Structures are given as structure tokens and as C-alpha cells.
Image: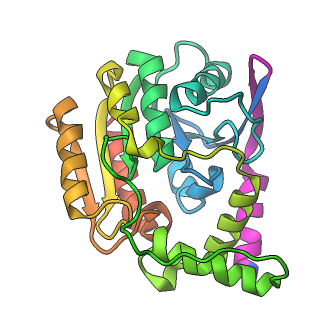
């Protein structure tokens, strides 16, 4: 692992205002950055706040960034079962109130499974949320897994560190990142550490209508950005997801980044950051 991969996360961690909030005895970990209108970042399954490692600095130059470890991930406590999106949202809502105040307005960005949870969080917070920005979530009532036949590898007992890294590098290239050149040491490190710390699994929830069930109660404007080469959204599914979202916000901005995979906030961070900043700066109250 090169020096950049070792230092990137540590540099952000050192710059963060690390906070822990509590709801019914359950602690939620947050890394907070910058000043301005608040924006909450919710990561994907098997993830943590480090899913946004290439986005935080750009966003925090303009906004107050609250990057959560969702309940059951990273440093946050494991919630009681069942681990459903509407059960993960209340500790996050309580954390937002504690960190920002009960009347603060904000925006929410949800990546992958975090997009489903973000929908439920936005529904709970109501008119306080100006924009809900989604990237690649399931929850549309359609199959959300990768195409059949995707060859994934598993970690076996007795593997060396280099062999374990090779497994994660292979799987990242099949599921998360389309450009092999972007499956770098930092991506492998983040993947390994996040998988080791994750105690919640989304399972089949992305195949359900978990996101659509929350959206009728969401008052925020919707925006979406998807990778054109997302392993979890082939062209037919992508068209269906876009159409479903536009039933709730017909004028929503929906961007597709050609050639980018599922984790486009990492792989195509330049494009994603430009879109995030432009969209968030157009939020009510900015």
C-alpha cells in the first residue's frame, strides 16, 4: 500500500471534528467538517464515512459537512434487529438535532444503501430538508443486485495480506468501480477496513420498495447521479429508477456519468463534486 493510501484517511480524520451522538443508548459517530449550510452524507452497505473520502474537502470548502457512520457501521453502535432503513434513520435524526439544533435546515446525500436510509431520514425531518441527493440506491421494488454470473472472490484462511488485497481489488472492479485504474490502494484499504467493521447487512432490502415507501413523505427536492456503468443498475433498471423518482419530482435533475461505476463518488469524484456543489448551492436557503 503506497503512502497516499496510508495518509489520506488519517489526514481527513485529523481534520475532522469527531462527535458522537446518542439515541436510546445507541451511539452514532460523526466526522464534521467546514462551515455553512449543513449537508449530511450517508454511505453505502459495508461502508463508513470513508466512502466520501474524495468528496469531503470539496464540499467542506462551502458547506458544513456531517459524515456519519450509520448505525451498525464503522465506529457507531450496532442497533437492535431488525436492521431496517426506518430503524436506522431515528438515531441519525436524533444526531442531526443534537449537532445542529432541532430547527436547522439541511440537505442530505445518500450513496447506495445510504440512499434508502436517506429517504427515511428526509421523511422524518420533513420541511427542514431542502434537497435529497441520491446516488445508486436500490429500494425501487426491482432486482438490484449485479448481473448474474459476476465472478466474485472470497477471502480464505491462510491468505497473505497481499492475497487478501488482491481479492478486494478484484471484487471492487466487479461491483463498485468500472475503470480498473481507479481500483487503487486507497480504495482497497477503505474496502477492507469497512467490511471488517460492518455489523449490519442490507441483505435483500434494496430489492424491496423501501425507498419508494419513504418518498411520499419527503418534502425535499430530489436530485440523482448514477454511474452509466453501475453494476447494480443496467440500462433497463436505470431507466425504471429514473422514471420512479420523477413520479415524485417531475423536474428533478438526474445525471448519468458515462463509464462510471457504482461508487462514482470515488471513481469520478471530479464530476461528482462539481455536480454536488452546483446542486447544493441551488438548495433553498443557500
128 in relation to 74, above or below: above
Image quadrant occupied by the C terminus: top left
On the picture, is 262 further left or further right than 101?
Answer: left
**What residue is at 61 percent from the left and 71 percent from the top?**
187
Q: Residue furthest right?
A: 158
On the picture, is 143 further left or further right than 90?
Answer: left
Color style of the picture: rainbow
The percent coordinates of residue 284 (x first, y second) are 33, 27
The percent coordinates of residue 205 (x first, y second) are 47, 41
175 in relation to 243, above or below: below
Magenta includes 24?
yes
Magenta includes 157?
no
Q: Is residue 2 among the parts visible in the rendering?
A: no
Residue range in magenta is: 4-25
8 in relation to 15, above or below: below
Viewer-proximal residue among 258 and 175: 175
**What residue is at 56 percent from the left and 48 percent from the top?**
43
Image quadrant occupied by the N terminus: bottom right
The quarter of the picture where residue 66 lies is: top right
On the picture, is 41 further left or further right than 159?
Answer: left
**What residue is at 21 percent from the left and 30 percent from the top?**
248
Amino acid at each position: 500500500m503506497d503512502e497516499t493510501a496510508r495518509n489520506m484517511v488519517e489526514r481527513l480524520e485529523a481534520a475532522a471534528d469527531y462527535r458522537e451522538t446518542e439515541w436510546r443508548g445507541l451511539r452514532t459517530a460523526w466526522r464534521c467538517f467546514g462551515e455553512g449550510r449543513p449537508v449530511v452524507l450517508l454511505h453505502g452497505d459495508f461502508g463508513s464515512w470513508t466512502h466520501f473520502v474524495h468528496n469531503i474537502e470539496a464540499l467542506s470548502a462551502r458547506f458544513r459537512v456531517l459524515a456519519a457512520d450509520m448505525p451498525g457501521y464503522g465506529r457507531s453502535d450496532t442497533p437492535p434487529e431488525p436492521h431496517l432503513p426506518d430503524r436506522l434513520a431515528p438515531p441519525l435524526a436524533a444526531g442531526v438535532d443534537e449537532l445542529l439544533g432541532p430547527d436547522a435546515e439541511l440537505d442530505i446525500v445518500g450513496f447506495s444503501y445510504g440512499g434508502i436510509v436517506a429517504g427515511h431520514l428526509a421523511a422524518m425531518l420533513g420541511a427542514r430538508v431542502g434537497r435529497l441527493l441520491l446516488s445508486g440506491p436500490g429500494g425501487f421494488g426491482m432486482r438490484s443486485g449485479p448481473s448474474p454470473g459476476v465472478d466474485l472472490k472470497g477471502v480464505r484462511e491462510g491468505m497473505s495480506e497481499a492475497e487478501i488485497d488482491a481479492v478486494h481489488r478484484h471484487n471492487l472492479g466487479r461491483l463498485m468501480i468500472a475503470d480498473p485504474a481507479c481500483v487503487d490502494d486507497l480504495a482497497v484499504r477503505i474496502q477492507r477496513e469497512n467490511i471488517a467493521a460492518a455489523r449490519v447487512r442490507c441483505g435483500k432490502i434494496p430489492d424491496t420498495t423501501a425507498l419508494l415507501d419513504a418518498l411520499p413523505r419527503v418534502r425535499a427536492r430530489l436530485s440523482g447521479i448514477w454511474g452509466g456503468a453501475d453494476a447494480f443498475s443496467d440500462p433497463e433498471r436505470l431507466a425504471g429508477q429514473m422514471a420512479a423518482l420523477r413520479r415524485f419530482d417531475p423536474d428533478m435533475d438526474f445525471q448519468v456519468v458515462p463509464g462510471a461505476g457504482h461508487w462514482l463518488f470515488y471513481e469520478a469524484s471530479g464530476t461528482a463534486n462539481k455536480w454536488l456543489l452546483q446542486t447544493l448551492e441551488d438548495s433553498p436557503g443557500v
